[in-house]
Image (cartoon, grey):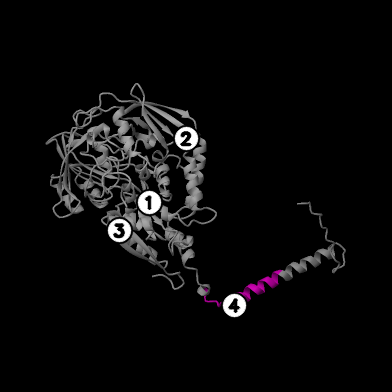
Amino acid sequence: MATQDCKEATVDFIISEGDPEMEAVADDIATNLAKIGITLNVRSLNDTEYDEAELNGDYNILFTRTWGAPYDPHSYFDSWAVPAHVEYSAIGNLEPPLTNATLLDKIAKVQQELDPQVIQAKWKEILNDVHQQAVFMPLWGTRSPFVVSRRLTGFSPGPQAYTLPLTSVQVVEGSSTVTLSPGVGSLFGTVGPLNPHQYGPNALYAQAWIYEGLVGYGQGGEVVPALATSWKTESNGDGQRVTFQLRENVKFHDGSNWNCSVARLNLDHVLSDTVRQRHQWFGAGKYLSNWECSDSGELVLETSTAFYPLLQELSYIRPLVFASAEAFHNGLDSDADEHNSCEPGGFGAAKWDFLEETITCKGLTDPIGTGPFKYVSRDAHPEEEGKDAKVVFARHDDYWGQKTGIEQLELVHYPDQKAVEEALLSEELDMALGVGPLSAQQVQEIKFYHSDKFDVRHSEVTQHALLVMNTQKSPTDDISVRRSVIHGIDKSTFLEEEFAGLEQAVTQLLPLTAPYCNVDLNPKWSYDPEKARLLNCPAPVESSGISTGAIVGIVAACVVAVGSLVFAMHLIDKEKQGKPVFAPEIEVVEKAEPA
């Protein structure tokens, strides 16, 4: 119960329907904030409602996560300029002298630097600017859990967020058909249309099984060869030119060949003048200005400006990855305006509908890539529209890289986490991978009580879970309210209670392991109930039992006493100097310099 002197406030807290992490801690956060006079109005929204609230700024507080490797910090911060992302509205009313425009300008300019020391210094300034605004409350570092049957071996968490790498998995015993419940924040619902060039509802982990880009993202942030084996970067006027040697003898799932003509076709569609407007959230979508094939079959990319994260962005799961030419309407002759690879209505929020006024989205005939798995079939969920009951993938036997021992992979829908656990223990299900299929408590119980059947692993911290506060909506437009929220939430306690101690509290927006983010920022955004109360609940003056009038009288008496003492000392000093007690002092005034 808040004291009567707290500034009472109600804040709108929206969470995504079915998000197990936020549903677990919403009550704890509400209880914490009630102690300082802040009432939490929790709204659980479906995907459409949630997207609309983000777009329209219809929230005070919203739960989200940083994007993780390889997107942080540059692409994540770049996305703040796009209205479809929650951070766009969150940073709309920053504390002076920082403004939305100056912050976004700094973010854009640092990416055009090529000197690592300059890049580091500028990111440090940006990270500090954002930290001081108290817009983000870091909660915990997310470590994805992976529960794998011991009839399988070789699974290893990958370095890239949103991926479920399976190429290293081998079958020790039993069937080479493997069942999986995947998640990247919720229970498995659908893999979407599996279009490589678009976003939700396409599942990132499934896109990564089917499609590949020119380069991949390795351990420690290393950019590694994928469909390109090597590359050379050189200056080109104000921009850069990168020449890629393409991998030979690579087959798409349909048996067709990977080559530069196919690469150029994909880029023509993704980066057409119209469609590229949807891809302004990352630098490659903005700065790639030309792509062509050399006489020897190399792919040559040019940028309009210097851009240090280019290779890192080419490792993203989407949209700069490659589908077979046979999947495009009219094949290699497919026109980017008349037969674009985009799905009809597939650009996301309604604000992007205008893109289809000038192009025709035809989609792809089939999801055909070069990746380690190929799509086979899906069964629609009988009761939930737009959801999958089961999706089947098969091993790509002509894959150029490491071949998995999984011959057939089946993604299975379960109604809740209890059903997932029961399926694992009955050996109906082989793997539960990622955040969502199981609660933290379930993961711990399987680890400690069923280790004979399952290997339980966790990824490194790749993302931070956080609360985003809207600077454009009362009462979170007041920085003192935002700071009260930050210091008023006891993260460590609810992490121990709700996450079985698997997650650790964090105090900064991005993991220290993200490029250029190993920066010590102050003040620490940690639990400090006294500070939270001081910010939102001014201490009552009469708490000691002494009246306000008495306090004023005491202070006045002290002032008089001190003044008398000083005057007496002054008189004594003059007597020592042999001066008349009331002799005037001579004031020396220095002549001021001209301005």
Q: Mark 3: give few (<14), some (14-19) or many (20+) Cα within 10 Å.
A: some
Task: Give x and y (percent) for residue 205.
Answer: 26, 41
Task: Judge left or right: residue 580 versus residue 4.
Answer: right
Q: Position of residue 367 (x, y in %)?
A: 22, 38
The stretch in magenta equals 544-562
Distance CA(mark 2)–CA(mark 3): 39 Å
Q: CA distance from mark 1 to mark 3?
A: 14 Å
The quarter of the rendered structure image containing the N terminus is: bottom left
Residue found at the far top of this picture:
296
Residue of label 1:
85
Pointer 3 residue: 49
Which residue carries the number 2 mark? 306
Q: How many marks?
A: 4
Q: Is residue 558 magenta?
A: yes
Mark with earlier residue (4, 1) = 1
Task: Give the percent coordinates (x, y) of residue 355.
Answer: 33, 47
Labels 4 and 3: the sequence-earlier one: 3
SS under mark 4: helix
Question: Disc 4 residue type?
Answer: Ala
Among numbered discs 2 and 3, the one appearing first in the sequence = 3
Q: Amino acid at mark 1?
A: His
* Viewer-side label of 4, 1: 1
